[in-house]
Image (spheres, rainbow, N blue to C red):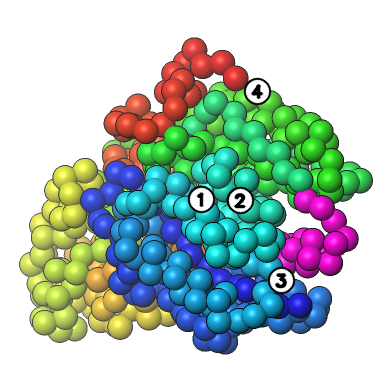
Amino acid sequence: MKILVGGIYHESNSFSNIPTDIDSFKSVIYLEGPRSIDDMRGTTSEMAGFILAAEDLGFEIVPTLWAWGVSTGPVQGDALDEMINIVRAGFEQNEGIDGILFTLHGAMVAENSLDGDGYILSKFREFAGDVPIAVTLDLHANISEKMAETADIIVGYDTYPHVDQVERGYEAAELLVRTIRGEIRPVTATRKPSMVVVPNTQFSDQKPMKELIGMAHAMEKEPGVLAVTVSGGFAYSDVPEIGPSVVAITDGDASLAAECADKIARRFWELREDFVLEFPSVAEAVAAAVSGRAHPAILADVGDNIGAGTPGDSTFILHELIAQKAESAVVIIADAGSVEKAVNAGVGSRVELEVGGKVDRLHGEPVRLTGDVINITDGVFRNRGPMRDGIIENMGRTAVVDSNGIKVVLTELKMPPWNLEQLRSVGIEPADEKIIALKSAVAFRSAYEPIAGKVILVNSPGISAVDLSKFTYEHIGRPLFPLDKDTIF
């Protein structure tokens, strides 16, 4: 049995002014052919799950492309077609492909299609014919009808922070193998409650999301139910498919699939008010961190959540830490220009910088500060821990500038703060700090919650802010709760 394997993964923020070209993928993870197996084996990734399944279930992997990009703006059409053509070539150059096993995000927006993942799957179907296709999706997928109709099997993450990629990859592979062998006949039903949900409320270890994931797990134990996916959706992709989805797959029983999907979708709707949260302002959050005794206090800069496509150079929290005379804090900001100045000055030098606020006018003005360059690194580190374990990350050249006790970590490339090794790689032990500002909504929790004295979610401005009424949507279907309070599902 030969199964074509790969992944094209991107979560696209429609409000970002940073275009996503082919180099955006190549600067993060872009592995062609056998290298995708060699580099991803043993990591916390779907590919690692595919590899384990191949060894256990006895199928041959035909590797194509493993491309993973940090969230930014919509993907350029030529870049997407270039990646699809690599997969197409892999299929056409290998006779006897029995199935396709692939990783997508589910919230990709492309220049040539608002439904980027549906576009990918439709192109696969063009060259693969009726060969069965199984895909894994992120928990924030905006699942479209085209995606559900084109893929034979959809398996979504159950966790946020995302720590179950290996298990979901294995699950998708196992269902695909059983389908190829004729042991099961997957039938899919998809339901979408009329709502849109911000990432913070999709934390899978707490209600309401925990309850919905629990319902899915219970259903998967019922006879005839093969897989149930609960996706919270991605609120910052301006697409018709925006919002939560429930995908139920059964063994040849369409009515059972519809029943399962309906039940969870209706419960999702019943819990809609629980998906609307209020957080303290930047000034209130910083005041609580400065005056608090539980250390480290984690300030989650929700409006500049790098994992959701923001620039990573918001200055609102840094400005407030300086204004409130914080004596000890760490702030990470992507600012290649400031890195260049710090590197040119060298370790031990005193520098004057205008930090952050340079990509757009939505994430604050540059902050003027004077400080000492205390470290310069190449910005490369290997993740350790439950999220992305074993995967090598690259922040670009990185400089640490200490300004009156506030350590500003300046990176050339933006990097989500999902691993403690990010700070350790630049000489900072997170557990020893008083305040750490992280540009994240939830993903930081897997690494930082075990060491945190207190976690404070900050209602900061930006293109991943929690107040969705501030966004100008052009393509979403209306009405949707909470944008439209009189929405009926």
Give the residue displayed 69% in from the left and 54% down from the top: 153
Whole-number angstrom distance, CA of label 3 to CA of label 4: 42 Å
Q: Position of residue 356 (x, y in %)?
A: 19, 57
Query: Which residue is disc 2 drawn over?
Result: 150
User: Is 55 left or right of 13, judged from the image as shown?
Assistant: right
Q: Label 4 neighbourhood size at 10 Å, few (<14), some (14-19), many (20+)?
A: few
Q: Amino acid at mark 3?
A: Asp
**Which quadrant of the structure image shows residue 394?**
bottom left
Asked whether residue 346 is drawn in magenta, I would say no
**Which quadrant of the structure image shows residue 48?**
bottom right
Please identify the dominant SS of the magenta region.
Answer: helix
Query: Which residue is disc 4 drawn over?
Result: 270
Q: Earlier in the sequence, mark 2 or mark 1?
A: 1
Q: Secondary structure at mark 4?
A: helix
**Which quadrant of the structure image shows residue 61?**
bottom right
Whole-number angstrom distance, CA of label 4 to CA of label 1: 29 Å
Front tag of 1 and 3: 3
Q: Please report the bounds of the magenta region as a residue range.
A: 168-186
Q: Is residue 32 visible?
A: yes
Q: Position of residue 428 (x, y in %)?
A: 38, 73
Image quadrant occupied by the C terminus: top right
Q: Position of residue 49 (x, y in %)?
A: 68, 71
**486 or 147: nearer the eye?**
147
Q: Earlier in the sequence, mark 2 or mark 4?
A: 2
Q: Are marks 2 and 1 in contact (CB under 8 Å)?
A: yes
Q: Amino acid at mark 4?
A: Glu
Q: Amino acid at mark 2?
A: Thr
User: Is 300 left or right of 460, judged from the image as shown?
Assistant: right
